[in-house]
């Protein structure tokens, strides 16, 4: 069923992992999808799977000029913007004394500044369509853990940004959705448990967010895998 027929969506971090699975799902659902990431080759390979529905756009989400170009190019091509998925993310894990300043800055730039920039430039185009912003946060945006200082701080910040966006945009009927998955079986997680969430499972949750009935907002969803009994403490 093409529930997103005629919709235009931007997905950041769209070249691999959750972003690529999400781009495919939106394309199958009838949307015109602009998949943004830094990897041109990976984006073009993905776009080749759905040449009529996925458009690759090379973009560094931490660069304001490139993000503005991403938004402007999308609207110029399709005449509107319905959905922005702030999916791009990066994780560097270490105890605070060992965590490098470079890794801290990288996480803040990709995980927090990127969604800010994309939302900033997208909002004027989402208001006319009463569109969606979907922020991909993490369980680490709700609970902290040792070794996750920088990552948790960036994701807690994204949760706060989502709350502010919700308050600022509700009068315009722009929906703001935040999804907080646990470990996902993608390259990002490194060595995920066998029972970790799949990108397809998280994608379906996001799909339900953006195809929710009129008047319904899935404001915040926390997803965790069901841990097998023998592995529970």
Image (tube, rainbow, N blue to C red):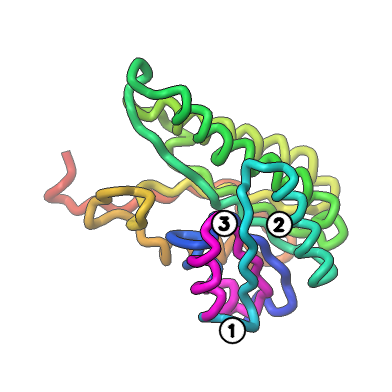
Q: Is residue 204 visible?
A: no
Mark closer to the chain start, 1 or 3:
1
Give how far apart the Cα atoms at labels 2 and 3 are.
20 Å
Mark closer to the chain start, 2 or 3:
3
Q: Which circle, 2 or 3, is nearer the viewer?
A: 3
Q: Tell me the SS state at disc 1.
A: loop
Label ID, residue 37: 3
Mark closer to the chain start, 1 or 2:
1
Give how far apart the Cα atoms at labels 1 and 3 are.
28 Å
Label ID, residue 132: 2
Q: Tell me the SS state at disc 3.
A: strand
Q: How many labels does the image show?
A: 3
Span highlighted in magenta in the image: 24-48
Q: Tell me the SS state at disc 2.
A: strand
Q: Residue at x 64, y 43 (%)?
A: 115
User: Toward which corner of the image does residue 97 lie, by quadrant?
Assistant: top left
Expressed as whole percent of the image width and height from the top left, the position of residue 195 reads 25, 56
Question: Is residue 206 shown above or below 123?
Answer: below
In the figure, is residue 192 to the left or right of 119?
left
Q: Do the residues labelled 1 and 3 touch (CB within 8 Å)?
A: no
Q: Which residue is drawn at 66% across and 54% down?
A: 217
In the figure, is residue 182 to the left or right of 61?
left
Expressed as whole percent of the image width and height from the top left, the position of residue 159 reads 58, 36
Question: Is residue 192 shown above or below 6?
Answer: above
Callout 2: 10 Å neighbours few (<14), some, many (20+)? many
Give how far apart the Cα atoms at labels 1 and 2 are.
20 Å
Residue 57 is a magenta residue: no
Question: Is residue 119 shown above or below 31?
Answer: above
Q: Is residue 200 visible?
A: yes
């Amino acid at each position: 069923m093409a529930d997103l027929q005629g919709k235009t969506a931007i997905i950041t971090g769209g070249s691999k992992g959750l972003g690529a699975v999400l781009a495919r799902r939106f394309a199958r659902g009838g949307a015109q999808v602009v998949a943004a990431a830094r990897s041109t080759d990976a984006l073009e390979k993905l776009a080749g799977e759905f040449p009529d529905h996925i458009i690759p756009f090379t973009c560094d989400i931490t660069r304001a000029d490139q993000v503005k170009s991403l938004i402007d190019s999308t609207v110029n091509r399709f005449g509107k913007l319905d959905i922005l998925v702030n999916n791009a993310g990066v994780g560097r894990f270490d105890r605070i004394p060992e965590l490098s300043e470079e890794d801290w800055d990288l996480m803040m730039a990709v995980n927090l500044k990127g969604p800010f920039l994309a939302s900033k430039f997208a909002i004027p185009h989402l208001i006319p369509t009463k569109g969606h912003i979907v922020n991909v946060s993490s369980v680490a945006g709700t609970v902290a853990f040792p070794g996750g200082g920088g990552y948790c701080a960036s994701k807690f910040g994204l949760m706060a940004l989502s709350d502010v966006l919700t308050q600022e945009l509700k009068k315009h009927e722009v929906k703001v959705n935040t999804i907080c998955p646990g470990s996902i079986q993608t390259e990002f997680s490194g060595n995920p448990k066998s029972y970790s969430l799949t990108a397809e499972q998280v994608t379906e949750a996001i799909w339900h967010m953006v195809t929710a009935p009129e008047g319904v907002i899935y404001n915040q969803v926390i997803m965790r895998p069901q841990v097998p009994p023998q592995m529970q403490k």
